[in-house]
Image: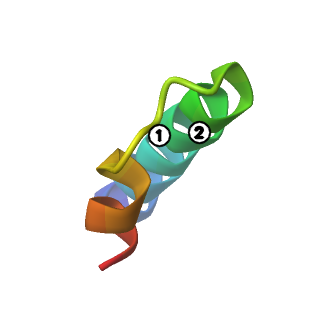
Amino acid sequence: MKKFDIYEMVTDLIIERLEKGVVPWGTIFVFR
């Protein structure tokens, strides 16, 4: 159950950075 919470927090942080446009190659590294 805790793992799901962590994944949610991580995805939320990624979405926030994506919206702000502060994600250069970090997204590619995360998606891989």
Residue 1's x, y, as percent?
38, 65
Query: How are the residues colored?
Result: rainbow
Please give the name of the residue rendered at 42% of the width and 45% of the height, measured from the top-left corner. 10
Q: Is residue 16 left or right of residue 25?
A: right
* Mark 1 surroundings within 10 Å by alpha-carbon count, few (fewer than 14), some (14 through 19), many (20 or more): few
Q: Label 1 belongs to which residue?
A: 9
- Above or below, comparing residue 31 to residue 25 in the picture: below
Can you say whether 11 is above or below 32 in the image? above
Q: Is residue 6 above or below residue 16?
A: below
Q: Position of residue 9 (x, y in %)?
A: 47, 40
Q: Amino acid at mark 1?
A: Met
* Callouts 1 and 2 close, C-beta under 8 Å: yes
The residue under the point 59% across, 39% down is 12
Residue 29 on image: x %, y %: 26, 63
Residue 21 lies in what quarter of the image? top right
In the rendered structure, find residue 12 and report the number of the disc placed on it: 2
